[in-house]
Every structure is written in C-alpha cells, then in structure tokens.
Image: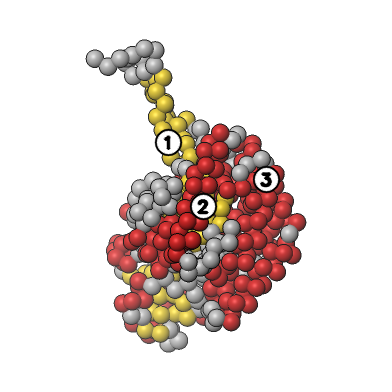
Amino acid sequence: MNIRTGESETLNTEMLAIGRAARLAARALADAPAAARNRALTAAAKQIRATVAAILAANADDLSAARASGMKDSMVDRLKLDPARIEAIAKGLEDVAALPDPVGRELARWQRPNGLDISRVATPIGVIGIIYESRPNVTADAGALALKAGNASILRGGSDSTHSSAAIHATLCHGLREAGLPETAIQRVPTADRAAVGMMLEGLGGTIDLIIPRGGKGLTGRVMAEARVPVLAHLEGLCHVYVHEKADAEMARAIVLNAKMRRTSICGAAETLLIDKSVLPSLGRSIFEDLARAGCEIRGDENVCALFPAARPATEEDWRTEYLDAVIAVKTVGGVEDALHHIETYGSQHTDSIVTADKATAERFLAALDSAIVLWNASTQFADGGEFGMGAEIGIGTGKLHARGPVGVEQLTTFKYVVRGSGQIRP
C-alpha cells in the first residue's frame, strides 16, 4: 500500500483500511491453531537467514541517512544491524515460537455452591498498535509476540529505520503466507507522516484495542497524552545501581561497569550510581577509574568531585536524566534508606539494583522499592524479556495495571470468564 504523505484524506482512508484489515485478521487468528502461528514464526526466522544480505543493505541505507543527519553514535548503535544481530532476531523468533501457547490457559477455576463451574481463561487482546523508534529489531519482536498471543498488530516504526524495518517485515509476511495465515495479521504503516501516529492514537475507527509505544520520552509522552485507547508503556528508563557498604568490591566494580557501559543506549542501562559514603574513598575510586577508562563521563556530587577531580559537578537535573549515552550521575548516600529515598524521588520505576553481601539489607531494598524490576547483585542490563526466558519483549511496562516489567506473550493476553452450568437460574 502506497500512502502519499501530505494528503490527509487519502491517509485517513488508507489508515482506516489498515485498521479494518487488522480487525478481520484478528478474528482469523482467534480460530487459528497454535501450530499455525508457530509455523509462521519459524518460517519467518528461516527467511531472515536467507535474506541477510538484503537486510544488511537496507540497514546500510538507514545508517547512511542517520549519520548524514548528525545522529549521535549511541543512537546509531540502536539502529545498526550486523550478522550477529540479525541472527539474534531470527533466533528470537524461534524462541517465541517454542514458548508455551499463552492463549486458552486456564488461569483459575472454581465451583460455586449452586453448582456453577467458573474458569478464567486467557484470550488474545485483539488488535495491538505498536509505535516505536530507531530499533529495527522491534519490528520482528513486536510482530512475533503479538502473533504468538493471537493478536493482529499494526507496526509504526521510526523514519530512521524505515528501510531495515521494511526488509524485516517482508520476512514476517513470508512466514504468514507459509503458514496459511492472513498477511494482514502483521501490518506495517509505510509512511513517515506523523499524522498516521495521531490516527492510531485515536483508535482507527475503533479497530485498535491497545497501543504500545517503545521509544524515548518524547514519543511515549505524546502517546500517553493523546491516546484515546488503552496504553501499555514506560516513560523513561531511569535505572539505578546502589553500592552498599557491604558490597563485594570486585562484584560491585563488574556490575557497575556492565550496567552502564555494556550498551548505553538501552532502557536498562544504569543512569545513576548511588554509593555509600563509607566505601567511597576505596571502592568508589576504583569504580570511577573503571568507568573513565571505558570512556564514561562522570557527573558527581561534591564528595565524588573531591575524590575524583575528572568528574563534573552534577546538577539537580542530572538525577532526573536518562542519558542513553556514556554518562553517569553519581551520588553518595548514607545507607539503604537514603538510597531508597533518592530512587523514589528521582526514579522512573523501571529497574533498580543493589550490590551487597548483606541479605537483610538486600531484602529491605527489594521489598521497599516499587519498581517494575528490582535486582540484587546483578546488572540492570538484565531488564530484558529474553534474559527473563520470555523469548523476546515489546518493552518494559512501568505502570501499575495489567503488566509490569518485560512485556512478553503472556502479558499480551487478557482473559474471559467461562461459566458452565446445568440449568441454574438466579432467584
């Protein structure tokens, strides 16, 4: 479908057509066996491996345009594909296919005194609109997870990854054809016109049941402000690592370095380091030297700057900033309660970690902190559905309703109540 940007009437008509096609596909998926959905995913994975060269060529076009536009290196890294990353995409599809079928699960069952048999059963949500930015792998992850859970999806990727996403989407369509499922079960909005996003947020004539944004604060903020349909999202990944005074030194150094520098552009990257004052002169110096050697800029409070002159003085805004880059804010604290207070004040309820050998302190941190993911002696970079054994994820939910943490196939279902009777009537 060729959507001509700037022609609002045509765009509206064609976007509504996408919505109607998705609704029809969702009905077809409701009747499709799990084996067909799995076959579509494994066939798509095979097609990805067969078209690596074409996907890389498409990605090269996106990278060239991104660099020409002055995109910073950390964001280019989010966009870049290589053979290893493409293989990971294919493997991710196979991993999702291998997961247990989330549809039709009996979540609970009980009998009433009057003989009614009541069960709560997992069902597809229906049509999910997924709006995302640079990461082309989200095209595969989002389409696959929605399909596995019996949902049709409408994918609207960012203009930065348009060629890469189109190439990956073509492999998903191939898989759907191979499995005898409608290609409209996974549709891609083929326009960079921002008006298309607005139409999705309005629900495309009532055809979209849920919107999931995956991207930066600007995108997610717009979606949450303008959506007229339910939204499953996180606004920011402002993640913390707290190094307690009883932390193992070598473990703390390894975790902090990995949490910040493994990949700085992902939402699970640590943005703020909290460290107990009692271990700042010894352990703190080693951690700062590790980060500096890895090319990380340190913005610290007055204690940090006094100890490590290469650090820049942190401002109030630094405690609230998701850098997505090789920058970390560092604050000294007076113990676990001080650390908890800081995270509760500035955090985004995404992912936060404590490093300590003291079990009681760790359990206090894990129980008291209301983040979607809390860790003990582990890197925040494990905030990932694949690392949780979910095969893949669409994003990390930080809201309080429906789903929190990695959003995988089970989180893309809802439920209904099935009541079996034997002639009961209500008096």
Q: Marks 1/3: CA distance?
A: 28 Å
Q: Marks 3/2: CA distance?
A: 18 Å
Report the front residue among 20 and 39: 20
Image position of 70 with respect to 123: above or below? below
Instruction: State left or right for residue 408 relative to residue 203.
Output: right
Q: How is the image coloured?
A: secondary structure
What amino acid does circle 2 point to?
A: Ile
Report the front residue among 302 and 40: 40
Q: Is residue 175 visible?
A: yes
Question: Which type of secondary structure does the marked residue at label 2 adopt?
Answer: helix
Query: Mark 2 vs mark 1: which is more N-terminal?
Result: 2
Query: Marks 1 and 3: CB-CB under 8 Å?
Result: no
Which one is closest to the eye, mark 3 or mark 2? 2
Q: Which residue is mark 3?
A: 177
Question: Which type of secondary structure does the marked residue at label 1 adopt?
Answer: strand
Question: Which type of secondary structure does the marked residue at label 3 adopt?
Answer: helix
Q: At 36% from the left edge and 12% from the top edge, which residue is drawn?
A: 423
In the image, residue 239 lies at what x, y percent? 42, 64
Which one is closest to the eye, mark 2 or mark 1? 2
Report the front residue among 122 and 174: 174
Q: Which residue is mark 2?
A: 18
Outermost residue toward the top? 423
What is the crowding at mark 1: few (fewer than 14 residues within 10 Å), some, or many (at least 20)? some
In the rendered image, the quadrant that contains the C terminus is top left
Q: Marks 2/1: CA distance?
A: 26 Å
In the image, residue 412 lies at what x, y percent? 48, 45
Q: Is residue 335 visible?
A: no
What is the crowding at mark 2: few (fewer than 14 residues within 10 Å), some, or many (at least 20)? some
Q: Which residue is mark 1?
A: 415
What amino acid does circle 1 point to?
A: Phe
Query: Mark 3 vs mark 2: which is more N-terminal?
Result: 2
